[in-house]
């Protein structure tokens, strides 16, 4: 029979953004005397059945498909973060276009009959680089992130001036679908400044946010994260009565909202792929519904860390989050149904007084002919096509390079070059990993647990080259303060600091690849070692479909299709394929470029099944 008696089935067909015209009363916590506290929407009793989809992790062409599948499963709300680092890549330069068109995503959700809970940060965690904070904040040596430090607050104020002016018209009371807005994110686990959360609450209110405000923390940090006048919500892995008791201690007589019910987890390079039992997910959601607890499934659809957006963990060792943000979620990375999807749909169908929408069709997948790269360009041949290097007596970290209008470099690689005339013990602080060369010969690697290597003796002066890769800034914990990338500090041989560096920024942006078009590419040799670009053509039919790149014989690097950065691949695993959306392919011929760090592989293959 399901968790509810037939007489109390849910019927929210009149409570959708398209049907509800009277917007006087939004999402409100009610505490009726003698009865269980509950939410009301438009004055009617309402329970949030939410699912998280991050628009910035899903190709825009597929937003509609993913939202339709959320609605067809029986959910009534979509929850999304807003990533500051992607929206303001340089101070005062805002990008809400294409895949970052937050307003279009919110309005599309409304069209589908879904409400929206917005989580605008400024910090969002989300396993994204620096938890969604822009790296240019780190140019200030005194910067204290996530506090009322003046440099941080000034930047947040300017960002919120722009962002919140876009959000205000999308609110429930203005006829939009946004029913609640989250204040920051899990601040209880950070909790360095008591006046920070009240400052953010005020910042939202002063700029015109009128909908219900919420905080979000796990049980352990709830006491430190909640603030007066804002509804506290809780994040959890399973139904825990003691956690709900703690929540009622923090705020008595209020309805319960689980802001993040984790139905899976993320992966890091070099670790095992994580999964969660669908039966456990079903049982927990069943208990939420029976207990009249509102909830948000994190993630309903995880999507992909395209480009360089992945974050990292650091519990003694730096580990980048993998490119796939599949998360073992309710929908797969490529938008396919899972056992969790069908279990939840059955459950939601059993408590709904009206039939659920029909299941949208699956997005077709394809396997295409293997690609043998025909041309290659060693990194050393590329340097002449780049902007002039930064000349500096001492090394400069990535964020502080005087480029991009004074905003530094956010992602990618940096190459440091200096002339040396003797060997010995080389020491350098690299973040996160570096290949070291004498002229074009690799002499070793450096990373956070290997800061020294031996430079062989030499008879003539040679070019020392240190190629440093940013593998993602930590997105959680106090370590976000210390995420400057590249070379930080001096480079020494036998304790003598080296001087006179030429520093090349390798951001791998669209403009970077435009420059490579004028380069002289060469045929791929039989043996190719060291960092290089490989160019090939992926041939598809007249109606391109989703596929997955399989790079078995390659080592580590990035893949670009028609200018789109699909993200990092690595021999370390667990991820063995890269998701390639059909929406990014052209009919017939598609340009594929690999930047491979170590050695060339043979073929670039595709498959219609992911390897996670």
Image: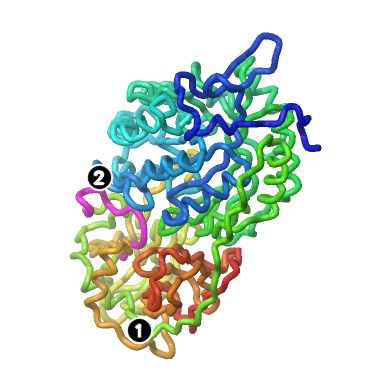
Helix, strand or loop: magenta stretch: loop
Nearest the viewer among 204 and 314 is 204
**Is residue 287 left or right of 171 when viewed as pictured?**
right
Q: State the image quarter where residue 231 is shown.
A: top right
Residue located at (35% from left, 84% from top): 375
Disc 1 secondary structure class: strand
Which residue matches tag 1? Answer: 375
Residues under numbered marks 1 and 2 in contact, where contact means CB atoms less than 8 Å apart: no
Residue at 31% from the left image edge and 40% from the top image edge: 141
Give the residues in magenta.
Answer: 403-415
- Residue at image coords 78%, 37%: 2
Q: Is residue 269 magenta?
A: no
Closer to the camera in the image, 105 or 228: 105
**Residue 463 locus on image (x, y percent):** 28, 74
Q: How crowded is mark 2: few (under 14 residues within 10 Å), some or many (20 or more)?
A: few
Q: In this view, does 131 lie to the left or right of 395?
A: right
The residue where tag 2 is placed is 93
Q: How far apart are marks 1 and 2 (CA)?
A: 36 Å
In depth, the one of 175 and 452 nearer the eye is 175
Whether residue 152 is visible to the viewer of this picture, yes or no, is no
């Amino acid at each position: 029979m399901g968790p509810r008696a037939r007489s109390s089935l849910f019927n929210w067909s009149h409570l959708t953004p398209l049907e509800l015209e009277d917007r006087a009363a939004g999402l409100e916590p009610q505490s009726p005397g003698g009865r269980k506290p509950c939410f009301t929407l438009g004055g009617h009793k309402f329970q949030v059945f939410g699912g998280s989809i991050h628009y910035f992790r899903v190709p825009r062409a597929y937003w509609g498909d993913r939202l339709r599948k959320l609605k067809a499963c029986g959910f009534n709300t979509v929850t999304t973060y807003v990533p500051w680092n992607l929206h303001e890549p340089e101070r005062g330069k805002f990008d809400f276009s294409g895949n970052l068109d937050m307003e279009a995503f919110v309005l599309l959700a409304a069209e589908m009959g879904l409400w929206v809970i917005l989580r605008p940060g400024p910090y969002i965690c989300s396993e994204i680089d620096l938890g969604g904070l822009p790296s240019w904040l780190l140019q200030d040596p005194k910067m204290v992130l996530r506090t009322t430090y003046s440099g941080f607050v000034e930047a947040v104020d300017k960002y919120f001036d722009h962002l919140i002016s876009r959000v205000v018209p999308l609110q429930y009371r203005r006829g939009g679908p946004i029913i609640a807005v989250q204040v920051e994110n899990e601040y209880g686990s950070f909790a360095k400044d008591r006046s920070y959360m009240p400052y953010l609450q005020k910042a939202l209110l002063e700029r015109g946010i009128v909908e219900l405000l919420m905080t979000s923390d796990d049980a352990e940090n709830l006491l430190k994260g909640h603030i007066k006048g804002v509804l506290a919500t809780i994040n959890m892995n399973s139904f825990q009565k003691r956690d709900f008791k703690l929540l009622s201690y923090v705020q008595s007589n209020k309805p319960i909202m689980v802001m993040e019910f984790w139905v899976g987890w993320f992966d890091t390079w070099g670790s095992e792929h994580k999964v969660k039992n669908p039966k456990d997910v079903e049982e927990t959601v069943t208990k939420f519904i029976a207990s009249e607890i509102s909830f948000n499934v994190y993630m309903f659809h995880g999507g992909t860390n395209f480009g360089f957006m992945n974050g990292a963990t650091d519990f003694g060792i730096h580990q980048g989050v993998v490119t796939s943000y599949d998360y073992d979620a309710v929908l797969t990375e490529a938008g396919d149904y899972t056992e969790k999807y069908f279990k939840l749909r059955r459950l939601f169908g059993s408590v709904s007084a009206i039939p659920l929408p029909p299941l949208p069709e699956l997005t077709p997948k394809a396997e295409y002919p293997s690609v043998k790269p025909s041309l290659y360009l060693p990194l050393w041949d590329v340097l002449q096509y780049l902007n002039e290097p930064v000349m500096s007596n001492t090394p400069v970290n990535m964020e502080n390079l005087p480029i991009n209008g004074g905003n530094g470099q956010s992602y990618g690689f940096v190459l440091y070059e200096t002339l040396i005339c003797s060997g010995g013990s080389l020491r350098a602080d690299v973040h996160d990993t570096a290949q070291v060369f004498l002229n074009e010969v690799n002499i070793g690697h450096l990373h956070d647990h290997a800061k020294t290597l031996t430079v062989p003796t030499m008879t003539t002066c040679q070019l020392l080259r240190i190629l440093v890769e940013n593998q993602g800034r930590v997105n959680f914990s106090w370590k976000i303060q210390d995420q400057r990338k590249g070379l930080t500090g001096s480079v020494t041989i036998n304790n003598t600091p080296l001087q006179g560096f030429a520093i090349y920024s390798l951001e791998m942006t669209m403009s970077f690849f435009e420059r490579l078009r004028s380069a002289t590419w060469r045929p791929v040799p039989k043996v190719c070692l060291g960092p290089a670009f490989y160019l090939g053509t992926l041939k598809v039919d007249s109606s391109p479909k989703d596929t997955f790149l399989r790079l078995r014989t390659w080592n580590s690097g990035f893949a670009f299709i028609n200018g789109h950065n699909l993200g990092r691949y690595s021999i370390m695993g667990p991820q063995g394929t890269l998701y390639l959306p059909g929406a990014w392919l052209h009919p017939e011929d598609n340009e594929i470029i690999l930047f491979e760090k170590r050695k060339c592989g043979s073929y670039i293959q595709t498959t219609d099944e992911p390897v996670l």
